Image (cartoon, grey):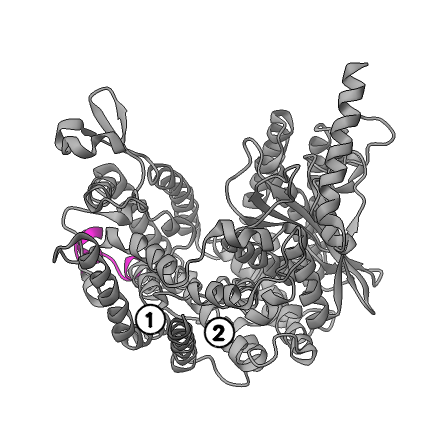
Amino acid sequence: MQRTILKQFLNYNLNRSTNLYFGTWSSLAAAFNSRPDRKLNFSLKKENAGLFDIPELQSCEGFYYIKEQCILHADKLIDEATSENRTRKMVEVFDELSDSLCKVADLAEFIRVAHPSAIYMQAAEIALATVSSLVEKLNTNSELYYSLLNVINNGDKIPTDEVDNHVAKLFSFDFEQSGIHLPDVERHKVVNLNDSLLRLGQYFVAGSTNPRHVRKDALPESVRHIFSMEGDDIVVDGLCVDSANSKVRELAYRIYFQPNDHQDYLLTEMLKARYELAQTCGFPTYAHRALKESAIETPEMVMEFLDCLSDGLKERARNDFYIMSEMKRNEYLSNSPLAPWDIPYFRKKARKQMFNVQNSEYSPYFSLGACMEGLDNLLHCLYGINLVIKEIVAGECWAQDIYKLAVMHETEGLLGYIYCDFYERTRKPNQDCHFTIQGGRMLSDGSYQLPIVVLMLNLPLPRWSSPTLLSPTMVDNLLHEMGHAMHSMLARTCYQHVTGTRCSTDIAEVPSVLMEYFASDIRILKSFARHFQTKEPMPDDMLQHLCASKYVFTASEIEHQLFYSALDQLYHARHPLNGSTTNVLVEAQAKYYSLPYVNNTAWQLRFSHLVGYGAKYYSYLMSRALASCIWQNYFKQDPLNRIQGERYRRECLAHGGGKPPRQLVADFLRKQPTSDVLVDSLLKDIDDKQKQIVEIQRKC
């Protein structure tokens, strides 16, 4: 009885408080301003729809079934591809095979990392391992490869177009990654090198986050209490970038980045193995192999871009560092030079001093519902689409607090589904990311297989007194990830192998980085930044300060990324390297970064991106430059321009990876994406933002 009364009291007060911020919101905003609370159902009962509405996944045992069905279907498609009686395009058969494998592998990969149940994670992991093993086996199937190669070289028995031919070549390149086109000895060598690289990469990434232990008497007694202790050892597991004590920041940097023989061995062996792999497969360097089918095409073109950007950035970056040096001199009343451990601290402090951007003051204007409503309005203005909340049935989701969105076009109807896994929970990966569950593709009956994706964030849960409130950084991340989702939704490729984000790495981030430009535009923010209680819009001066604060010391930040990109290219150039990995770093830093190398440090041993983005780290700068070009030429004057939005969708997003990336970019920009074009756009962006900062400071 008492429990019932208490429950009624709590429900009354919760409804009363939530009505304060539901009042005038749209249905979409109201939905995201409350926490979904659905009954999970992983039983075999009739009402259980199964994960992602897949009936076979009503229980974890379903992963065994879909895995076995995938194997059977793959065998049939292999027989079809190698048969003389084939009645459809070879590339259609290959794409169906790819789709069959990806539907299981992509789904299993997501459930493996996201599902809170250990038995589901284990079942998904087994399915993923089985399908991955099948993929490796297919990559060494000579009969399958040469059937495809015959079509590429001699033409298919069914007429093909440019997209068919391009996608067929992408499939053949995937085969050749395993050395299938090589003689037996070399092919076995490639397989062994790939196995070795997998292990080396896993070990290197694992070691890149290990803490450093030093004897406590190696540190001044006055700062020992800052760090964790294990017996007589001090443990340094990070850089202490927010510490106001410059000595603490310096010690953390020097200790955390100390050289480590084992990590250096792993990195050196990984780079050697990559070079040997590239040479065996007929490429001059690993960078040449990695950049094949990219927008920038060759490592020589990458270095031309980086060198050109470096020349343009130097003076601008030095000006940033001069300002930070003055800040350090004034704060500590000393002439000690600016050092790498100072940069994050003074960048953050400058943003606070110049514009007083405090998360606590801005977050009330960025309720999750308001942000989703703003996104919905933006997408409708640009593309004529709306985000519609859909009811989730029992068993469809892996956690209780998931939202499901249908992406609806005003004339084309349903384009796909986005599952929003936005809230933090125990054992959930602590990173914002986009997962493809099902890629879009044209089916044989003329219908279209709808794309399904998951957006994963780690936002705080709503409170009784307020909905989830986002910091400005969280708003940027939300729009960034939604950029990836829109790429998946708006790509209308015939083949899932090239759907949406399945494109060249150096253009895959363009849609998401472009969305950050919208997130930093006062006109866009003004359209949805409203106080969750009063519904009052964010004051203009707050909007101006927020947008300007995002671009404080941009030149030095880009120069830092440029240095990383150049080092990555040098590591993947010809071997043997010019000395140790640290020797190469010292030379690269002297040329590409305005601050000097710190003796007896080796931060490259913690640069885990070298594993996943080997020879491709420049892609961040490339995508930023392309997004800058697109913004300045097509959206800066009118960010809600429907004509330009439709053109961007039709000429960029719709193709996914189904068009050669350099041709796609050139056709959209109406000019070749040369180094000068890309660098000029980035530098203009920096200068325009600097003028904005100066103007706002003048008004303060």
Which quadrant holds the N terminus?
A: top right
- From the viewer's perspective, tell me whether residue 592 is left or right of residue 161: left
Q: Is residue 42 magenta?
A: no
Which element carries disc 2, helix, strand or loop?
helix
Residue 91 position, x and y percent, is: 67, 62
| Residue 199 in which image quadrant | top left
Q: Nearer the viewer, residue 236 or 139?
A: 236
**Which mark, residue 306?**
1
Q: Which residue is mark 2?
A: 628
Q: Nearest the camera: 326 or 109?
A: 326
Is the residue 673 above or below the residue 409 in the image? Answer: below
Q: To which quarter of the image does residue 353 belong?
A: bottom left
Looking at numbered disc 1 in the image, what kind of residue is underneath it? Leu
Dividing the picture into quadrants, the one containing residue 219 is top left
Residues drawn in magenta: 570-586
Q: Three-letter amino acid code at disc 2?
A: Ser
Q: Which mark is residue 287?
A: none
191 sits left or right of 331 in the view: right
Q: CB atoms at circles 2 and 1 under 8 Å apart?
A: no
Indicate the quadrant containing the C terminus: top left, top right, bottom left or bottom right. bottom left
Vertical relation: 555 (above or below) 365 = below
580 relative to 2, above or below: below
Residue that sits furthest to the top in the current view? 1
